[in-house]
Image (tube, grey):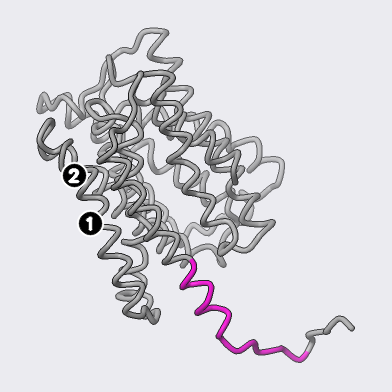
Amino acid sequence: MLLAMLLAPLIDVFSKLATATASPTLITAARFFVQALCMLPIVLLSRSWRRFSWRLSLYHAIRAAVTTLSMVCFVATLAVMQVADAVAIFFVEPIILTILSGIFLKEVIGWRRYSACAVGFLGAMIVIRPSFQDIGFVALLPVVTAFCVAIFALMTRALAHREDPWSMQFQMSLWGIPICAALLAIGQGQNIAFLAPSLPDLTTLSWMTGVGVFASLSGILAVYAYRAAPASVIAPLQYFEIVSATLFGWLVFDDFPDPVKWLGIAIIVGSGLFIIWRERRAASRQPVTLSADTTLAP
């Protein structure tokens, strides 16, 4: 998971580099295309394509649409905002997921976790405020991305026990390509800049390829991490992405958060870690029910 979080900001770095000559929608389409190519050998070798559930295609299409919206919003933000700032604002996603889980999954969320959610949003506002003064409402797009990713996570939870994770990723990428193609057609017809297609040069093409490759690689590493350890153990390591995003933003773009933004980042991270800690405590209090064929070690 540490390696996945080290590589994940490279998706944002390559996206930001590509925005010089490509629209966010074109970059998102390239990500889906490269991801599908990266996943194809795994799907073929594991023969997981035999277990495709075409009845769930609508759900995969919705997951792809939500991912497309989140990616387009985030890449549009990266064009004008520092990588570390955008990633920090995005990390209100666990907070949004906690709230949505209480609403839609009927999970019991205590006042302490709701208070931590409020504090986390306060931290996000501290990071957003100076950016909002400089670039306007674009500074709020990472919050839209976080909301979309939270919805995506809820849908993934609902589907995870029905389908193989590799086939889920592959089918989502397949659906994402025509969705992006439709958006590009609209952008071309209506002359909408952030949706418009373009013919990228070799440099931009290499940046967009990097987006797809590192999205696939970090995703695969995260899947193996979650298979090897409980989510409650792995989840705190996700905040390492803020550290690596700051490092890459500094090395590539010479961007570094100021003290006020670091305060906001610290509040977001602290509230997120507190929510994870409370979830672990709540899970440890739940009674364990043993099935008839359960064998206890001596």
Mark 2 or mark 1: which comes first in sequence? 1
What kind of residue is marked 1? Leu
For image coordinates 38% across by 14% down, the residue present is 204
Measuring from the top left, give residue 4's x and y in whole percent. Answer: 57, 40
Magenta-drawn segment: 277-292
**Along the line of sight, which residue is nearer the eye, 224 or 164?**
224
Measuring from the top left, give residue 76's x and y in whole percent. Answer: 24, 32
Q: Is residue 104 left or right of residue 50?
A: left
What kind of residue is marked 2? Leu
Q: Is residue 209 above or below residue 39?
A: above
Q: Is residue 105 above or below residue 220?
A: below
* Helix, strand or loop at mark 2: helix
Query: Residue beneath label 2, please?
Result: 140
Report the disc number at residue 122: 1
In the rendered structure, does residue 210 fall within the stretch colored magenta? no
For image coordinates 58% across by 80% down, the residue present is 284
* Helix, strand or loop at mark 1: helix
